[in-house]
Image (tube, rainbow, N blue to C red):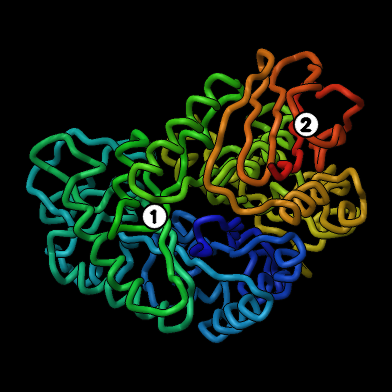
Amino acid sequence: MEWWRHAVIYQVYPRSFADADGDGVGDLPGITARLGHLADLGVDALWLSPFYRSPMIDGGYDVSDYRDVDPVFGTLADFDDLLAEAHRLGLRVIVDIVPNHTSSRHPWFVEGRRDRYIFRDEPNGWRSLFGGPAWTQVADGQWYLHLFAPEQPDLNWHNPDVRAEFDDILRFWLDRGVDGFRVDVAHGMIKDLAGVTLFDHEDVHEIHRGWRKILDSYPGERMAVAEVFDTAPDRVARYVSVGELHQAFNFDFLEAPWDPAVLRRIVDASLAAAAAVGAPPTWVLSNHDRRRHVTRFGSVRRARAAVLLMLGLPGSAYLYQGEELGLPEVLDLPDEVRVDPQWVRSGGAELGRDGCRVPLPWSGEAPPFGFGPGGSWLPQPADWAGLTVAAQRDDPGSTLRLYREALRLRRPSTTLRWLDAPDGVLLFETETLRVAANLSPAPVLIEGRIEGPATPLLSSNEMAGELPPDTTAWWVVQER
């Protein structure tokens, strides 16, 4: 079975993972020094958010040079060292590729190569996802499209030069040894300016089929995962059909409330859509663009139950840095430190994404909690002292230990069968596990519904005969 069909992949947001040089911003040497944490955690791979040259208007998703490392993160040699150390530890490395847009400081835009962007004499009424109009006027009166910030002009993927450039960018990183790509806004590169199609245009699939051929031309099961949002599961599945990309993120699952009926419906729809095209389902609870699920669900207890539910499902799972520590969203950052364009362009009406990007706490009793020898680019809450890696490492009841144990016990699976369960309980069986998640407000007795040992293999909270509220437990499937 290909590794990516059942992998657990850990997202690293480089600015906020670990800082080696003391400037308060995370960097590649800092990540390399902390890779042992990921190996001990038990993940299969790490996904690096952008570390390329960038003005950092959008946290690195405004790329000015796709073939070099921004000096704030280090050098290409530092990247090679990171890749070598990760591979030595048995970790694969996936890097972000940002094909929908470049930075406005990219040489093409600076040199006036308008044929490679989307310029028009008159704008339409499209709005930017970061707020405000999606068009900005230049000195001679023309307008260019930017679905995100004005500093992120959208590329013209009808231009063969753009396609050839990104084919070459993929090969550049594959030649260096990366194991795959996370494709930012994978459904957005082709626009129908005459109509209303901003995303999910039919012609985008031709691009991904070409990329799949490039990936398949390299040894070692190189892969790509697509970011496709606000799209129905059957449409998302088309991005991972035969001959296209390997995985697509499951935003329906990520955005689901703590509701058993909703979660079961999403799981069924996701499994059915993936099975129809022979792709693995994926599951994710948090990322660099969404509010952390501890805060979204309202408690660490629910977050612990949610991750055991997720890791018990068939397919592949993605973790976001810090969720293994039970980190909450930081909602009270001072206005003056916020830099997210969502905050800036909304005039402060939207908090934006800075709250899920606060640097990780590694050790110590006070900020910056071992993040680096200096401070941290966003302030950490003082009460994170009990959430550091060092504080949780040897605590058998900690969230970190729960993640480590779950990843140690987890086994690949491909099928799911629902079992009869009390109201508010999700109870299912895969080839390797029976999983019960109690999303109701009261404890439930599940005796007689679970074959084999009465004591669970693992549970998100303490159990004493009954399955408490907001608790998930695993049992081993007995051989028949």
Residue 152 occupies quadrant:
bottom left
The residue carrying pointer 1 sits among few (fewer than 14), some (14 to 19) or many (20 or more) residues within 10 Å by Cα, namely many
Residue 87 percent coordinates (x, y): 61, 78
The residue that label 2 is drawn on is 301
Say what secondary structure mark 2 lies in. Answer: helix
Residue 155 percent coordinates (x, y): 23, 59
Residue at (88, 32) in percent of width and height = 462
- Disc assigned to residue 7: none
Q: Left or right: 62 with respect to 378?
A: left
Q: Nearer the viewer, residue 407 or 170?
A: 407
Disc with the residue nearer the chain's start (2 vs 1): 1
Say what secondary structure mark 1 lies in. Answer: loop
Mark 2 near mark 1, Cβ–Cβ under 8 Å? no
The residue that label 1 is drawn on is 184
Residue 102 percent coordinates (x, y): 32, 62
Q: What kind of residue is marked 1? A: Asp
Residue 354 occupies quadrant:
top right
Q: Look at the picture and state if 142 lies above or below 133.
A: below
Q: Left or right: 40 with respect to 190?
A: right
User: Is residue 300 in sight in this rendering?
Assistant: no
Q: What kind of residue is marked 2? A: Arg
The residue carrying pointer 2 sits among few (fewer than 14), some (14 to 19) or many (20 or more) residues within 10 Å by Cα, namely some
Identify the image quadrant of the C terminus: top right
